[in-house]
Amino acid sequence: MSRWVKVTRLPSAVRGSVLAVVLAACLAACSSGGSAAAPSATPSAEPSVTPSAEPSVTPSATVTVTVTESRPSVPVATPTPAPSRTGGITKVDEVTGQLSPVGKESIVVDASDGPHEVHLTGDTVVLDTQGSVCDKGAVPHRCTSEQLIKALKAGVSFEAKVLITDGDAVKIEEIVKD
């Protein structure tokens, strides 16, 4: 007769204890990474079973299993969308023509394909080569959009190449004809 059959014929309280010891030993072997040999599933000494009115169970060994899981604390990287090269700009135009002021913050570029009204911002770059808008710094002089409006209202004639994005002038570069 095999030992497994003998274990199954034990009273239910003893079978539960043996099963708990075997399970704890298996868990201990698994938690150590499986490098240690797993203990035998059958006890080394066969328990003697004597029929009595109440079965008494005395465990021969106490197994304490502590399972710790070592995980490195690495934050989970979430993919981020790549930044757009145009920064959300939907339309880019480049027009060339004579400039005229319209109010405090806009100009009209009279191009060959018709007039284009363009909004000026504080970030609009104005490059003046002749010094008719501003004359400080190296040539081409870097002027502000406020200086451009002031010069155009004072009667300065200005022909330029204008880079427009979504209706705003980004760069205004004076064109000097030879």
Image (tube, rainbow, N blue to C red):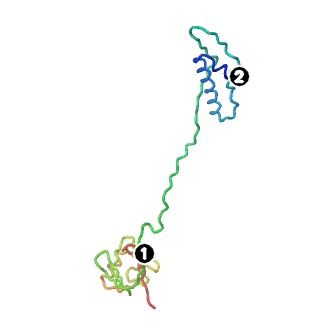
Taking the spot 68% from the left edge, 29% from the top edge, the residue there is 38
Q: Is 4 displayed left or right of 178 in the figure?
A: right
Is residue 34 placed above or below 122 in the rendered structure? above
Q: Residue furthest front?
A: 1
* View extreme (top): residue: 53
Crowd rating for badge 2 (residues with CA inside 10 Å; few <14, some 14–19, many 20+): few
Residue at image position (42%, 67%) is: 88
- Residue 127: % across, % down: 43, 79
Asked which secondary structure carries label 2, the reply is loop
Q: Nearer the viewer, residue 6 or 88?
A: 6
Between 76 and 167, the one lying in front of the other is: 76
Q: Quadrant of the N terminus?
A: top right
- Dot 1 corresponds to which residue? 92
Q: Relative to 51, say whether 3 is above or below.
A: below
- Give the spatial CA distance, label 1 vs label 2: 87 Å
Q: Where, by quadrant of the figure, is residue 31 drawn?
A: top right
Residue appearing at x 62%, y 17% in the figure: 10
| Residue receiving disc 2 | 2
Q: Amino acid at mark 2?
A: Ser
Q: Residues within 10 Å of mark 1 (few under 14, many from 20)?
A: some
Among numbered discs 1 and 2, the one appearing first in the sequence = 2
Q: Is residue 162 left or right of residue 30?
A: left
In this picture, is 47 found above or below 143?
above
Q: Position of residue 24 (x, y in %)?
A: 61, 26
Tell which residue pokes out farthest to the left in this image: 103
Residue 8 image-quadrant placement: top right
Q: Give the quadrant of residue 37.
A: top right
Q: Position of residue 79 (x, y in %)?
A: 50, 55
Q: Is residue 7 left or right of residue 97?
A: right
Between circles 1 and 2, the one closer to the viewer is: 2
